[in-house]
Amino acid sequence: MITLNTASGLATSGGTIALSGTVYNNNAPSQTFESIGSTSVITSAVGLTTTITAGGNVSANASSSPVAFSGLTAAQTYGAGAGLTHGTVFSMTLASVTITGSGAYGNNMSTPMSASNGAQSLTVTVTSAAITGGAVSKLNVANASISESYSKSPTDFVSPYTFHSKLGTGGVLSNFAVDLVFNGTTAIPAAAVGTVSIALGSLGTSTAFQGATVTGSTAAVSQGGFHGEAETVLATGSSTTYTSFIRIHNNSGNAGNVTVTVKNDGTGAALGSSFSLAVAANSTVTLSAGQIEGSAGITPVAGTNYTVDFAGQMTGYIQHVLFNPSTGALADMSSFRNGGQDNQAP
């Protein structure tokens, strides 16, 4: 008689299927000639463990020049070792991935899947608003010695976005990072926590293997820097009594550039072109409605009111003031002052 335990023994890592046997007299079953002890014939391998850890949250500038606020890494030149020049960029780590253990055997039934050969075919799916909006130039997977970049036209990066890597080919791979590289010319959008999904596999005729997909969280992106908005800014000639002035104050210890965008206060339609101005550290710049119109290339129409938006590489606040040159009277139209919710980012 041979006893075989069921294959459910393999359902848990380290579980086994075992055989045991007894040789006995068929006419006298109580007479045993030989007993064969239970012997394991196959053991379930400990599977690969893939752990995904979200990167550190970052704060990005809301203007078109994404300076390095908290969490963003600046001054990285990619491709220099290969004789390529991609310039100085800003980047962030969406998530880090750690692979441990040995998994099931490959098709040759002798080579266990490991962190090195299990990542020879790597499928990465990124679901995050951080890759949308045209700010991303590359998606990277990289460990201490290897970096692979996946470049497309910025408009081709949509969420979710899937790409394939061979990062583990030819070397031991225990961990790597999934990074975003920004182009430096488009504002980085705010993004809530997203997901990164990793599917591991191995290439080759004898060890082809597809592992389970593991999903983890990504870092989030918040908007930092200077934000401000002034409403009901009078166009030149709209009033014979008052003229609108905007005061922009930089209360940080560093000089900053501010991007100014003008819209029709009634319709929200953009007017003219955005322009930039420099504000020295701990100083104030005052602009009249006429100066704003001239810099934006707007021909004033009496009776028109503007909404003027400001975004920049500093912290501070704005003031909208109406001035009567005949009487010297000032009317402060600002809804918020220094530290106000709409005029200063934390």
Image: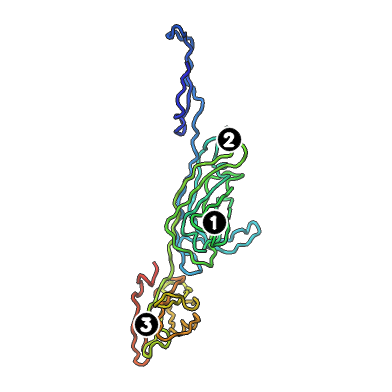
Residue at left offset 57%, top offset 59%: 152
Mark 1, residue position: 139
SS type, badge 1: strand
Instruction: State left or right for residue 317 relative to residue 81.
Output: left
Residue at left offset 50%, top offset 34%: 45
> How far is mark 2 from mark 1, CA to CA?
32 Å
> Is the residue 198 above or below the residue 231 in the image?
above
SS type, badge 2: loop
Mark 3, residue position: 321
Residue 107: image tag: 2
Three-letter amino acid code of the residue under disc 3: Val
Q: Residue 316's image quarter?
A: bottom left
Task: Using the image as rendered, state which of residue 262 and residue 13 is in the foreground.
Answer: 262
> Is the residue 48 above or below the residue 189 in the image?
above
Q: Nearer the viewer, mark 2 or mark 1?
A: 2
Q: Of the two numbered discs 3 and 2 on the same chain, state the one appearing first in sequence.
A: 2
